[in-house]
Amino acid sequence: MSKKRIAVVLGVLLGLVLTVAAFAGGFSVVSYTDVSVRGYNPGPVTSPQYIQNGHFTNWNGQSPEFWKTYNNPSPLNPGWEVHLAFVDLAVGGEGRGVNNALGYFVRTGSTGSQYAGLSQQVNIPASGAYWVQVHITAWEHNVQSPYNSVAWYGFGSTDSPGSVTEWRELFPDQYVCENRAGICNHLGRKESVFIEAGSYLHVQMGMKFPDHQAWTVFILDDISITDFSDGISVDVKDFIDDGDILWDPQALR
């Protein structure tokens, strides 16, 4: 057995152990320290910011502050595995601990689909159009079905994802990046969105089909909701490549 195959097997076994801990009494956070971002290091948002901890800088024990995390459906479908990850996206030549992110690991079961997500109530002053940015990256292993690894964001009237009336796709491609590549884009969706006052932002990701022994890692970062002011560019929209995410293809997940 090759070293790469051994690493993948060990990663799957570790995922089994971590998932038991994660859903026995709430999420247990797994740390990914082999991941880094290149070519993108946004400065502070100077326009009023209507989402809290959108850069996932602050964590409170087992979860990022101000965010509700969940798996959908709950309990998990038979054989599926999900765990939450604290991701340390070291920037370029800088040290660790300077750019945090949130990750979800999803591994296929015997039937059905499995999703994970997070939500937060936005604090906009009134209903209207706002500039929304959501950044995500993902890599997969052993996925055979197109559009299996998927992610969306949307706004709902409650903290339940069932309240979302329009989901906005975060990946335009049939497949996300291959684990063996060790690199993927830091993909940003940027657009004007009409948001009702009191709404909740939902981001949901997961796998639609139970491809045998397949898994996907999703990493979410750099979410903002702002006014159209203070240098915010409104000329770009939809999917923007804002840099690269790098990782160790043999790291345990």
Image (tube, helix red, strand yellow):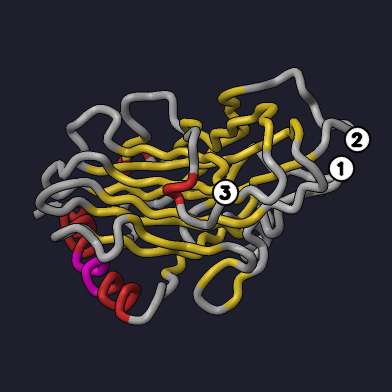
Hey, which quadrant is residue 19 in on the image?
bottom left
Q: CA separation, marks 2 and 3?
A: 29 Å
Q: Is residue 49 left or right of residue 146?
A: right
Q: CA separation, marks 2 and 1?
A: 6 Å
Relative height, residue 19 to residue 210 (above, below): below
Of the 4 image quadrants, the one containing the C terminus is: bottom left
- Of the two numbered discs 3 and 1 on the same chain, state the one appearing first in sequence: 1
Residue beneath disc 1? 47
Residue beneath disc 2? 230
Residue type, numbered disc 1: Ser
Residue at image position (40%, 46%) is 205
Q: Which residues are magenta?
A: 13-17
Viewer-proximal residue, 74 or 248?
A: 74
Residue type, numbered disc 2: Asp
Viewer-proximal residue, 163 or 232?
A: 163
Q: Nearer the viewer, mark 2 or mark 3?
A: 3
Taking the magenta stretch, the answer to whether it contains residue 176 is no
2 and 1 marks in contact (CB < 8 Å): yes
Residue beneath disc 3? 157
Residue 39 in the image: x percent, y percent?
65, 37
Q: Is residue 182 left or right of residue 2?
A: right
Figure label count: 3
2 and 3 marks in contact (CB < 8 Å): no
Of the 4 image quadrants, the one containing the N terminus is: bottom left
Relative height, residue 31 to residue 72 (above, below): below
Residue at image position (64%, 51%) is 91
